[in-house]
Image: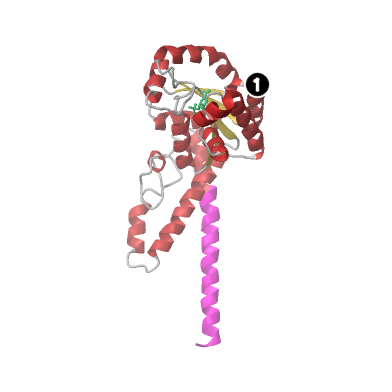
Amino acid sequence: MQIQDKEKLQERIRQCDEHIIKALIQRMKLTRELAELDQKYHLPLLTRDSAQGGGRGGDHDGSREDNPSEGLHGYLDTMLRDCPDETMIREIYQTVMESSKKVRAQSLFSCNILLVGFMGTGKSTVSSYLVKALGVEEVDTDRLIEQREGRSIAGIFETDGEAYFRRCETQLLAELQKRKNLIISCGGGMVLQEENVRLMKENGKIVLLTASPETIYGRVKDSRERPLLNNNMNVEFIAGLLEKRRPKYLKAADIIIDTDGRDVADICEELIEKVAGSAE
Ligand code: S3P
C-alpha cells in the first residue's frame, strides 16, 4: 500500500468523524427544541413505549405522536442488512437514544424530583417509570438504607427501633444535597421530621403522591416489608395514620398528584408537566 492511500483513508475517516459530531450536535439541539415545543403546546412529554420497555433498537426522545425516530427502526433494519458491524452500530444508536432522553429530561427540568407520600401511593412504581422514560438516575431511600445497613427495613426497626431508621433517612438526605437531576423515591415517613423537609426543599421539587386508604390497602396488603403495617394491615388503621400524617404531607408538597384509579403513564405525564411548568 502506498503512503498516499493510507493518508486518503485517514482523511476520509476524519471526514466521517466530522459528520458524526456535527450530526450529534444537531440532534441534541433539535431534541431540546422538540422538548420546548411539546411543553409550550401541552403535548405529551413522556414516551410510553420506552418507559414500558417496548420498542426496539432503543427508543426515542419525543412524544408519542409525530416522533421522527419512530419510522427509523424499519429504515435501520434495511440499512444494517448484511452489515458486518450491525450489533455494534445498534449499540451506538441505543446510546444516542439514551443520551437524547437525558437531554430531553434536562430541558424539561434541572432539579431533583423527590417523591413523597404514604406507603402504597406508588412512589417506587412512578420512580421506575420516570427512570426509563427520562434516562435519569434514581435513588430509593429505603433500598439504599437497606443496602448500607445490610439488613431489611423490618430488621432495622426490630433491632434498633424506628428512631434509628429515621436518623438514617436524615443522614441520607443530607448526603444527596449536592446531586442533580435525580428521582429520589422517599420512604413514606420522610416528611415527618422537619429537618428532612427543610433538606428536601433545598434539594428539589417535592411531589406528593396520594391515594385513598382503600387503594393503599389493596396495594400493600400482601407485603410483609412495612413494619408499621405488619400487625395493622387493615383499611381503618391506614385511614387513621394517613389522617394523622396528612398535614405534614400537605405542608411539604410543592406538587400533589392523585394516583387513585390511574395508570402509571398518566400519573407520570401529569407529574412531569407540573414539574416542568414549575421550574424557576
Ligand atoms: C414508612 C414507609 C416505608 C419505610 C418504612 C417506614 C413510613 O416506605 O420507609 O417502613 O413511616 O411510612 P414506603 O413508603 O416506601 O413503603
Residue 170 found in image quarter: top right
Q: Nearer the viewer, residue 141 or 136?
A: 141
Residue 14 included in the magenta stretch of the image: yes
Give the dominant element type of the magenta stretch: helix, strand or loop: helix
Please give the count of numbered marks on the rendered protein.
1
From the viewer's perspective, tell me whether residue 105 is left or right of residue 93: right
Residue at coordinates 54% horizontally, 30% vertically from top-left?
156
Q: Is residue 2 above or below residue 128?
A: below
Residue at coordinates 36% horizontally, 47% vertically from top-left?
55
Which amino acid lies under the numbered mark 1 shown in the image of this protein? Glu
Residue 267's x, y, as percent? 43, 28
Residue 159's x, y, as percent? 55, 29
Q: Is residue 215 above or below residue 280?
A: above
Residue 133 seen in render: yes
Residue 130's x, y, as percent? 47, 37
Residue 208 included in the magenta stretch of the image: no
Q: Which residue is mark 1?
A: 194
Residue 42 seen in render: no
Residue 88's x, y, as percent? 43, 63
Q: Residues within 10 Å of mark 1 (few under 14, many from 20)?
A: few
Q: Nearer the viewer, residue 185 or 18?
A: 185
From the viewer's perspective, tell me whether residue 64 is left or right of residue 160: left
Residue at coordinates 64% horizontally, 27% vertically from top-left?
201
Residue at coordinates 32% horizontally, 61% vertically from top-left?
78
Highlighted magenta segment, given as a residue range: 1-29
Tag 1 secondary structure: helix
